[in-house]
Image (cartoon, rainbow, N blue to C red):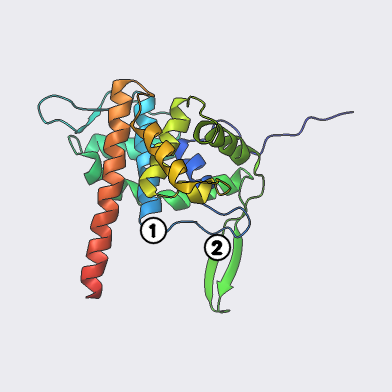
Amino acid sequence: MRHTARPAYVGGMLIAEDLLLLLYDDQTGKPITGAPGLDFSLAGAVLIELTLQQKLDITTEGKAGRLRVLDGAPTGDPILDERLSYVIDKPGKKPKDQIKPLSKHLRNQLLARLAQRGVLEADQGKVLGLFPVTRWPAKDARHEMEVRTQLEGVLRQGLAPDQRTAALIALLSALNVVPKVITDAVDNRALKQRAKEIADSDWAAAAVKKAVAEVQAAVTAAIVVSATAGASAGG
């Protein structure tokens, strides 16, 4: 009797999960970019997801640029619902003020779930034979390859992006890691410019586009603030 291969995961992936897969090396299981940018971008991805699901919006009148809850009902995804509840309890905040608290524990939650789904493998080891460390190499890269194929189609072949792909590109552009994800591009400058054009283009409804722009700015601002604080502490 012939059996069809069972997918490595059940249900759809979050944008944050797609982003995390792109930001971890499949072989070494190490991130290709550091904290806090990686963690802040994951939180940004969650805000974008909630906006796409019409749970959140960005205000344009009165106190503009604030997070507004449109629908506080649970999404059914525990990771999203935990962050949605946080926004509901802290109303009227700007995305840049929510990125850091929303990023708390988020990366570990996403990594653990991807490992549970069989997409990543939790590889336990020790640094210098003493300090425990976990690497997250790919176990089943089929979904990630689909995401990469969509990214390359948009960034290298000029195809029009769907909302999720455009959101990913916007976040990767904010992190300045597009050439680290699309590694075989001939002209990295042109690749980065194409990514910026996508991020700035009218690829989504105005409300979603504004949310992405606010999240991009919030991620960038949060990285700068953390870097400045770190420099001051080390000075």
Q: Which residue is drawn at the image coordinates 72% and 34% (left, top)?
A: 6
Q: How far across and how far down the image is residue 60, in percent? A: 17, 25
Q: Quadrant of residue 27?
A: bottom right
Q: Nearer the viewer, residue 58 or 180?
A: 180
Q: How far across and how far down the image is residue 76, in percent? A: 45, 30
Q: Nearer the viewer, residue 84 or 203?
A: 203
Q: Which residue is drawn at the image coordinates 23% and 71% (left, top)?
A: 233
Q: Which residue is drawn at the image coordinates 26% and 55% (left, top)?
A: 224
- Please tell me which of labels 2 and 1 falls first in the chain: 1
Amino acid at pointer 2: Thr
Residue 35: numbered disc = 1
Query: Dot 2, crowdedness within 10 Å: few (<14), some or many (≥20)?
Result: some
Query: Dot 1, crowdedness within 10 Å: few (<14), some or many (≥20)?
Result: few
Image quarter hosting the N terminus: top right
Q: Is residue 62 visible?
A: yes
Q: How far across and how far down the image is residue 200, in percent? A: 33, 32
Please tell me whether mark 2 or mark 1 is closer to you in this view: 1
Give the total number of marks visible in the rendering: 2
Q: How far across and how far down the image is residue 106, in percent? A: 41, 48
**Residue farthest along the right direction in this orientation:** 1
Q: In the rendered view, tell whether residue 106 sits above or below residue 123.
A: above
Q: In the rendered view, tell whether residue 115 sits above or below residue 63.
A: below
Which residue matches tag 2? 134
Q: Is residue 226 left or right of residue 159?
A: left
Residue 213: numbered disc = none
Q: Which residue is drawn at the image coordinates 57% and 31% (left, top)?
A: 11
Q: Is residue 71 visible?
A: no
